[in-house]
Image (tube, grey):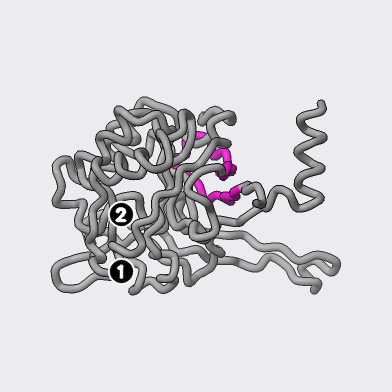
Amino acid sequence: MAALVNFMTALSDGAIHVIDLTAPLSHETPILELPPEFGQTQRFELEEISRYDARGPAWYWNNFHTGEHTGTHFDAPNHWATGKDKDDIASVPVARLIGPAAVLDFSAQVAADPDFLIEVDDVRAWEAEHGPLPAGGWLLVRTGWDARSSQQDAINADDTGPHSPGLSAECARWVAQESPVVGMGVETVGTDAGAAHSFDPPFPCHSHLMGSDKYGLTQLRNLDLLPPTGAVVVASPLPIVTGSGSPARVLALVERA
């Protein structure tokens, strides 16, 4: 009981700061666009049911339509073929939705090269300075990509395809199979780099993370407000039965210096 009382006191007196890592969800939210022969996700849309009128004189509400993997969202293991027999989004253990964060900043490298790929040595260099990645925690990758709020900027595509940063295939395998984290969070539209369709395996973050019963968080923002270590992430997807993912509200708790 004392621990919760102390926690609530720290929240109320400002000793713990709550930072929203979630991008607003609207029709303008960037979505992944697959080649036309594949099924496509739906943009976020609101359908008004009533707004203080004859359809409902005292209340306003909407239906909404979108894909599971729209905006800031949580990838469950069954999202990928490698994890097809693992947890759906409703079955993710709730204890794994809260965990410590390691924030790795590659925004300078990405500003110089939007196709920048993070290697295992880059993570090892961060660990040499800040300590090991947290067991049961999240590896959060800051790239500055959260400044790209429009569809075209977020996808950053030209005639050769999309150009956005991410992990190399070997780094994705290492994070999934050898690191102690439960998942990875990124500012980009998906967890994989723009060119990941050509990697071996294709889309290695999805392939390795989902296959290792780990998770992905995408389209995060405000990672620049987090310290390299010490923040706690709270990720809250909807428990959609049999679902492969869900839009999520993602918060970070940071102790003020």
Image-based side of 102 in relation to 121, left or right: right
120 vs 106: above or below: above
Q: Report which residue position mark 1 lands on.
A: 111
- Residue 77 picture location, percent across and down: 39, 34
Q: Residue at x 27, y 46 (%)?
A: 122
Is 106 colored magenta in this rendering? no
Image-based side of 164 in relation to 201, left or right: right
- Foreground: disc 2 or disc 1: 1
- Residue 9 picture location, percent across and down: 81, 43
Q: Which mark is residue 170?
A: none
Magenta range: 231-252
Which element type, helix, strand or loop, lies under badge 1?
helix
Q: Residue at x 30, y 28 (%)?
A: 177
- Residue 24 picture location, percent across and down: 56, 64
Name the amino acid type tagged 1: Ala
Q: How many numbered circles does the render carry?
A: 2
Q: Residue at x 21, y 52 (%)?
A: 196
Image-based side of 56 in relation to 129, left or right: right
- Quick one: 257 or 9, which is closer to the camera? 257
Q: Report which residue position mark 2 lands on.
A: 39
- Quick one: 210 or 61, which is closer to the camera? 210
78 vs 188: above or below: above
Which element type, helix, strand or loop, lies under badge 2?
loop
Q: Quadrant of the N terminus?
A: top right
Residue 178, located in which quarter of the rendered image?
top left
Type of secondary structure dominating the magenta stretch: strand
Residue 55, located in which quarter of the rendered image?
bottom right
